[in-house]
């Protein structure tokens, strides 16, 4: 097991390198680079304030370390990243790691709550749909599942903001409440966006649960369990669900990138200061270190989830051994 | 039913030997009511897009400033927006974007993923390893962040979005699906036979492998359609999509709708409903197609486990 984990982690290194190189190159090719933006801004600033424009494009480029060839820049960035230093933001020269540690927990909370809610919706309905196959309950469950996949999350979010405000004069808070200041208020603020993420994500999980349950329920050992006289509850939960869960977990693991994408949009709509809004701003202002740093974090999260998914197989199915 | 009648129906079913497409359509119409409804929704989408010029009462960018932010009424069935543009017309013209995206991006994705998946599975070994590691890397990209970056790079526009969506989809997880489908038939007799008579690799892949993975490819295509339309809407919503004034449903939902939502809540309602209906239709149709085309899911009618039936048997 230990050796397996170490080998898997070693295998992620080339993947991470590839991912970071692609993003590193990509952001630097966006037309209208950061230097142009900065110089424009400075000119606007000087014409307004009447201050002398000291910095030219060349000195600015040098000060930000963007004047060296791109592979040298990447080398510097990687050697910093290995030591846990992701550089300074181009606008404002703040530490990227510090900003990340401020914003990642917000997105993380949103994502985890969304994941929990989606599983709470998906698994019971999926199981029910399967054990009552082709009944009205099943049809209802399946319709809900397909609707959940089809409804755009940003539309639901917009509706949640528009209609309660009209009908009951109630709007979700647009001021971020920190967990330390007011845990209740913080959870209340997160519950709506994470419920929307959870709802949108539940569809796929629900369908997977149903399909796998149907397959498992036709196995011989289920018939044995019935003939032993076990109750339906024990059969469904202990015998069937446990065996049906493996592909479900795979699907959930594969949805992590979707979870991150969903957070970007919902943070934008509900004014949560997480990484989602930050990355939009970073793309618009061409703040390369932010994009690269965030990309690294997200890639590590996704790869970590993949590893956890693979490891969870052994926990669910003791026949699986990792070497 | 008499033996003669049964014999007659059996003969009738034997006689019906349609091409794959007609067969599939007939089975969906007969066995899958929900998929039929979904298919009708998709058909409606195409017809609306095709005849948008006839259906829409106004142009998509005809501004009547006197009629700003009007609620739904006889003159403007779905109301108007902040520039006095008819929302019905804008929603109707918006179907075109969804059609372009919904067909264009999956088509590109299909070609790329089929090409990569076939090569990866057919040649195996080092080729397979390299392609799969590459797919791994693409799969752990944060999709939306990459798309935003690439669109910032190419500039917003319909063609750019189709290309970005299609390429990113085509070199990602879908390669795996095609690969596993090809792996499944790579060792079958007819492929071996084709190789034995000296058929070149490209010909074997095109003439013997490709026709036999049509079913998973069709499923892949329909699944991608809904996803592509939704992603375009998301991008437009975030301001990285099809630039105004052309109406994209996602764009219509974005900032304007949210700025004027107090005075005109219907601004946010219609594009979202249209999106939901279209994606729901595509998903239902895709489900039906998968049920009909996937050999693992067909022909299992008799052997289905039914809890109720078993319970009844056990308790009686």
Image: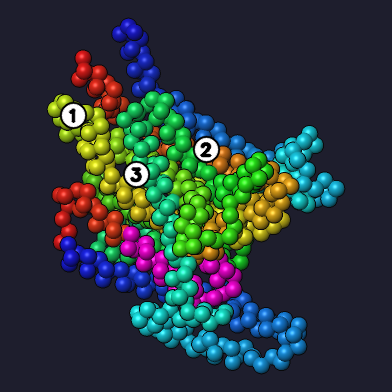
Main secondary structure found in the magenta portion: helix
Q: Are marks 2 and 1 on the same chain?
A: no
Q: Foreground: A136 or B155? A: A136
Q: Of tags 2 and 1, which is closer to the observer?
A: 1
Name which residue lies at 52% across and 67% down: A279
The chain under label 2 reads B
Q: Which residue is at 43% across, 78% downward?
A: A86
Residue that mark 2 sits on? B281
Q: CA distance from mark 1 to mark 3?
A: 44 Å
Query: Which residue sits at x=42%, y=60%?
Result: A108
**Residue identifier under label 1:** A230
Q: List x then y, in percent, for residue A27.
A: 52, 74
Label tally? 3
Position of residue A148 in the picture relative to residue B189 (left or right) = right
| Of labels 1 and 3, the one closer to you | 1
Q: Quadrant of residue A212?
A: top left
The dot on residue B142 is: none
**Which residue in the protein does label 3 denote?**
B212
């Amino acid at each position: 097991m230990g050796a397996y984990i170490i080998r898997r982690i070693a295998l992620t290194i080339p993947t991470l390198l590839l991912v970071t190189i692609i993003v590193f190159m990509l952001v630097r090719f966006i037309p209208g680079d950061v230097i142009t933006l900065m110089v424009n801004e400075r000119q606007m600033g000087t014409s307004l304030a009447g201050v002398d424009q000291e910095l030219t494009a060349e000195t600015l480029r040098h000060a930000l370390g963007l004047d060296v060839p791109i592979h040298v820049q990447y080398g510097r960035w990687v050697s910093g990243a290995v030591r846990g230093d992701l550089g300074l933001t181009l606008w404002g020269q703040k530490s990227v790691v510090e900003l990340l540690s401020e914003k990642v927990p917000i997105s993380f909370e949103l994502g985890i709550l969304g994941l929990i809610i989606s599983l709470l919706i998906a698994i019971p309905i999926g199981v029910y749909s399967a054990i009552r196959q082709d009944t009205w309950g099943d049809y209802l469950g399946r319709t809900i599942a397909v609707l959940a996949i089809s409804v755009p999350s940003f539309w639901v979010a917009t509706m949640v903001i528009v209609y309660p405000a009209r009908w009951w004069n109630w709007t979700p808070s647009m001021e971020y409440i920190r967990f330390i200041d007011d845990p209740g208020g913080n959870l209340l603020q997160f519950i709506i966006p994470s419920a929307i993420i959870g709802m949108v994500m539940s569809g796929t999980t629900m369908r997977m649960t149903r399909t796998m349950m149907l397959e498992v329920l036709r196995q011989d050992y289920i018939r044995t369990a019935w003939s032993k006289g076990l109750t339906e509850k024990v059969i469904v939960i202990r015998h069937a669900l446990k065996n049906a869960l493996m592909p479900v977990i795979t699907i959930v693991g594969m949805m992590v990138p979707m979870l991150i994408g969903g957070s970007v949009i919902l943070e934008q709509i509900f004014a949560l200061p997480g990484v989602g809004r930050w990355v939009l701003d970073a793309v618009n202002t061409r703040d390369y270190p932010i994009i690269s740093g965030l990309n690294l974090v997200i890639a590590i999260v996704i790869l970590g989830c993949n590893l956890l998914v693979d490891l969870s197989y052994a926990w669910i199915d003791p026949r699986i051994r990792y070497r | 039913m008499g033996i003669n009648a049964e014999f007659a129906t059996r003969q009738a079913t034997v006689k019906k030997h349609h091409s794959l497409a007609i067969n599939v359509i007939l089975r969906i119409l007969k066995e899958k009511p929900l998929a039929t409804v979904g298919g009708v929704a998709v058909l409606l989408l195409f017809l609306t897009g095709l005849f948008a010029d006839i259906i829409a009462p106004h142009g998509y960018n005809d501004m009547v400033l006197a009629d700003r932010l009007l609620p739904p009424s006889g003159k403007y069935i779905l109301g108007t927006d902040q520039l006095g543009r008819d929302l019905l017309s804008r929603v109707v013209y918006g179907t075109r974007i969804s059609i372009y995206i919904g067909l264009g991006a999956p088509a590109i994705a299909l070609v790329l993923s089929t090409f990569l998946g076939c090569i990866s599975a057919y040649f195996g070994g080092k080729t397979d390893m390299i392609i799969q590691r590459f797919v791994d890397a693409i799969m752990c990209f944060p999709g939306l962040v990459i798309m935003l970056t690439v669109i910032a790079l190419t500039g917003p526009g319909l063609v750019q979005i189709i290309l970005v969506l299609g390429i990113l989809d085509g070199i990602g997880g879908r390669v795996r699906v095609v690969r596993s489908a090809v792996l499944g038939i790579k060792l079958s007799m007819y492929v071996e036979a084709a190789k034995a008579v000296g058929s070149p690799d490209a010909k074997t892949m095109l003439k013997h492998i490709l026709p036999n993975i049509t079913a998973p490819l069709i499923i892949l295509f329909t699944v991608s359609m809904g996803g592509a339309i939704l992603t375009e809407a998301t991008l437009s919503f975030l301001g990285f999509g099809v630039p105004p004034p052309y109406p994209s449903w996602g764009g219509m939902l974005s900032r304007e709708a949210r700025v004027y939502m107090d005075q005109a809540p219907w601004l946010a309602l219609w594009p979202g409903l249209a999106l939901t209906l279209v994606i729901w239709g595509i998903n239902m149709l895709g489900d039906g197609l998968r049920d009909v085309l996937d050999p693992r899911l067909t022909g299992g009618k008799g052997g289905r486990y039914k809890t109720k039936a078993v319970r009844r048997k056990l308790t009686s």
